[in-house]
Image: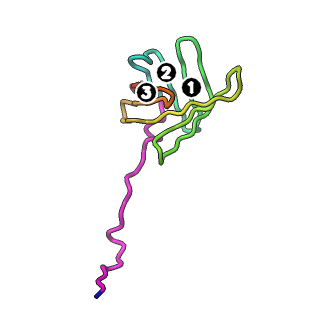
Amino acid sequence: NFTACSDDDDNELSLPVDNTLELLIGTWEGTGEVEGEILTFNKDNTYTEKGENDTQNDTFEYFPNRYMFVTYYTTDWGEENTIYTVVKITEDELYLNNNGHSDIVIYKRK
């Protein structure tokens, strides 16, 4: 015997909404080992990273299926990029892991 459920669409599986990119947009101030660093992400996929001695401006790309983003920038050696994993993000806090390092760095919304 074969039993089937109704094919009504009332019980469709809904996936969680990823609002990470929406939350990322804005200005973040580093804490701990990145204290004094300021990250600003703009809706047009540009960003600014201000450190103690330098400022970087360029573009970033967000990958929602991996909760990561890549910053692209130019140095004296050519085109470079840095990959970050978004470990946690809220309205007020951003926890990042630079995939080249094992430490998680924390930023607070400015």
Label 1, on which residue?
48
Mark 3 or mark 2, which is nearer to you?
3
Q: Is residue 17 magenta?
A: yes
**Residue that badge 3 annotates:** 102
Examine the image and state in which quarter residue 73 appears: top right
Q: Earlier in the sequence, mark 3 or mark 1?
A: 1
- With respect to residue 37, does 82 lie above or below? below
Question: For residue 20: magenta?
Answer: yes
In the image, is residue 28 above or below residue 43? Answer: above
Q: Where does residue 110 sit, x and y in percent of width and height? A: 42, 24
Residue type at numbered disc 1: Thr
Residue type marked 2: Ile
At 57% from the left and 11% from the top, the residue drawn is 53
Residue 65's mark? Answer: none
Marks 1 and 2, how far apart at CA: 8 Å
Residue for point 49% across, 39% down:
68
Kindly state the secondary structure of the residue where label 1 is placed. Answer: strand
In the displayed structure, 61 sits above or below 37; it is: below
For marks 3 and 2, the one nearer the N-term is 2
